[in-house]
Amino acid sequence: MLATDEGMTAKDLIASNLVWDNHGCMPLRPFDEAFLPKLELYRASGVDVAMLNIGFGEQGIEEHVRMLAHFRRWIRAHNDRYLLIETIDDLSLARATNRLAIGFDMEGANGIADQPGLISLYYDLGVRWMLMAYNGSNRIGGGCQDDEDLGLTAYGREVLDEMARVGMVACCSHTGYRTARDVLEYSRKPVIFSHSNPRALFDHPRNIPDELILGCARTSGVVCLNGIGNFLGNNDTSTENYFRHVDHVVQQAGAEHVGIGLDYVFDTAELDDYLVKMKDMFPPELGYDLDGGFKCVSPAQIESLVELQIKAGYSQEDIRNILGGNLLRVAQAIWNPGLS
């Protein structure tokens, strides 16, 4: 059994450190609870903190609020296993009481429309990060699949200011490169890529160049590696392939700027349906029509990921930071110590 120089196995490291998956996808159906018990996968895999998506792309205010109401109601009804995140202290409370701490995220800013004041409402309801644009342009800026990215808008700067005031983390996954550069330059807080992979390893516009990886690090931010096979390359969701992407970012920016954001999809049939109905957002020529459907790295693979890190000579501190310490550092720097 592999162990660090200090004698810690992968299982030991997971059990003794905060483990944080920064992006997961439950079905976005506000009256369907069938998949919610599958959140147990996180607990069974040693995950302590999970961020669940509440909306993406062109979905608007109503869709986002409906999903928040749906998730929050079910989680509160099962508070022996799960804890809704309100403050940083809830992360340690969840670990101490053997519960999964759950927060939420928004993929794109359509959920706030033209009203930045909604950011504080979402924060109070548990949303802890929001990305700027989902594949295509919006009021904030450009998306990663736009033919032309015109950069961060004046409204986008207003939104970033409000996010910083409220305590919500800014994310540049799915965002156009020019807009992402603008965000990294404008923000006075750490910025994250919540679920992005290095384009140097697989050429896809959803992946990011080393320039943005380094820019994120300069903000004291974190790049969380995505577990979707289409972005890892060749739909290969082996732990070995995922580790290749993790290690590339470690070698570029340092282990203190790396995290986990698996983008695990609990209902792949819903994803397949989106791919059929939203071809403008998911064009087949960019590999979104994979034979056999998308594959995802599972939270259950985190232990084998740590084993590969030990084998590669990562220190316990590096592994601890990648598992969750880096995202905790960002949360401590940005989250509001009380509700907004």
Image: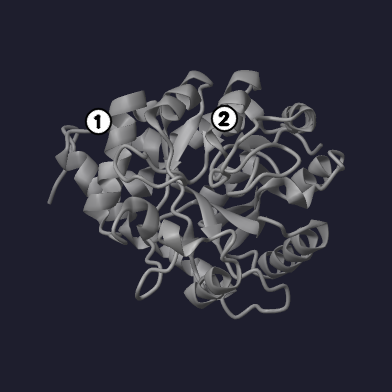
Locate residue 5 relative to residue 146 in the image: left or right: left
Residue 135, position in %: x, y?
58, 49
Residue 127, above or below 223: below
Which secondary structure, mark 1?
Answer: loop
Q: In this figure, which residue is indicated by the disc labeled 1?
A: 315
Residue 255, above or below 135: above
Name which residue type carries label 1. Answer: Ser
Which secondary structure, mark 2?
Answer: helix
Q: In this figure, which residue is indicated by the disc labeled 2?
A: 178
Location of residue 331 (image quadrant): top right
Q: Residue at x 73, y 68 (%)?
A: 70
Q: CA distance from mark 2 to mark 1?
A: 35 Å
Locate residue 283 relative to residue 291 in the image: left or right: right
Name which residue type carries label 2. Answer: Arg
Q: Is residue 125 visible?
A: no
Residue 319, position in %: x, y?
32, 37
- Of the two numbered discs 2 and 1 on the same chain, state the one appearing first in sequence: 2
Residue 132, position in %: x, y?
65, 40
Say which of 28 and 315 sits in front: 28
Location of residue 120 (image quadrant): top right
